[in-house]
Amino acid sequence: MQVVETVAQVVAACREARRPLGLVPTMGALHEGHLSLVRRARLENATVAASVFVNPAQFGPREDLAAYPRDLQRDLDLLRAEGTDLVFAPPLEEVYPPGFDTYVEPGEVAINLEGAHRPGHFRGVATVVTKLFAILRPDRAYFGQKDGQQVAVVRRLNADLDLGVEVVVCPTVRESDGLAMSSRNVYLNPEERRAATVLYRALCRARDLYQQGERDAARLRRAMEEVLRQEPLARTDYVSIADPDTIQELERVEGPAMASLAVRIGRTRLIDNFLLGRDLS
């Protein structure tokens, strides 16, 4: 496995790489969710590349950039074990050199939900994804459905800017009790970890009602809220039933929809979602 830190090195490596090349962008602190993306990429590409970069541009001023878990050697060991060919692990100044002043501003797909609660977050995501696509020129890039709005932003970005990358979205990987795997789960103490399963239970309630024929989006939202209110440690940022491509809230679910929510358990903010009426390949 080749590990490089500079743009020049990774450009040269990608030019020589066998195609197709699949990219798994990460911020490190890897878990089974990330590794499932690497495995999918390994099945579908001659070369598998991963990036490990904690992107400061997508953190707000009161968010956990300094505390975000970092263990590059552990990440590299995990990636090597999965047969990754190339890892781009740049320092901050390689991605945002002195004088950097160009950002990618996503449109309406980034306004609601996470966009409303984390101003500037998707500008940071869109900018770093655009840079990674431009630097590595992957044929495919792999993202997890857990970050459902991010998936919509990346798809829109890729289409609008004609970046020509096949965006592959993979199912959310969960713990045995349903909690979506996340690098931020390490922040939860035992009591909070138990409480965090309320996100999954709320989504299951919406999914069950949908499968029973409920199509009124307001009723599906209320059902999720009722489950969340039963957990004293949960503080809800939002619950949503939205179009999965535009992230616009729905009145009725006539086609595919994304049930999503953001909930604070103690100091840890967790997000999760289910797709209703749409399966991931």
Image (tube, grey):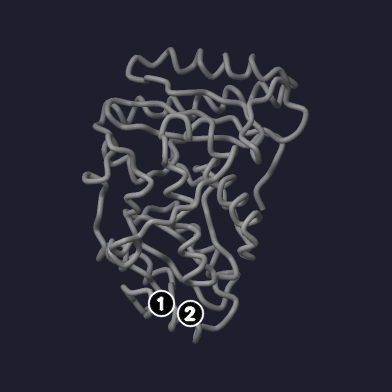
In the image, residue 195 above or below residue 3: above
Please name the residue shown 37% across and 19% down the image: 235
Q: Secondary structure at mark 2?
A: helix
Specify few, some or many for label 1: CA neighbours under 10 Å numbering under 14, 14-19, or 20 or more.
Answer: many
Query: What amino acid is labelled 1 in the image?
Result: Val
Instruction: Name the one closer to the observer, 36 or 23.
Output: 23
Q: How many marks?
A: 2
Q: Based on the displayed image, in which of its 4 quarters is residue 263 positioned?
A: top left
Q: Secondary structure at mark 1?
A: helix
Please name the residue shown 39% across and 33% down the image: 270
Relative image position of residue 172 (x, y in whole percent): 52, 45
Proximity of marks 2 and 1: CB atoms separated by less than 8 Å: yes
Please name the residue shown 43% across and 68% down the image: 82
Instruction: Name the one closer to the observer, 261 or 185.
Output: 261
Q: Which mark is residue 190?
A: none
Distance of label 2 from label 1 (alpha carbons): 6 Å
Q: Which mark is residue 14?
A: 2
Which quadrant would the N terminus be assigned to in this image? bottom left
- Say left or right for 277 vs 85: right
In the image, residue 181 above or below residue 34: above
Query: What amino acid is labelled 2 in the image?
Result: Cys
Please name the residue shown 59% across and 45% down the image: 152
The residue carrying mark 1 is 10
Relative image position of residue 101 (x, y in whole percent): 38, 56
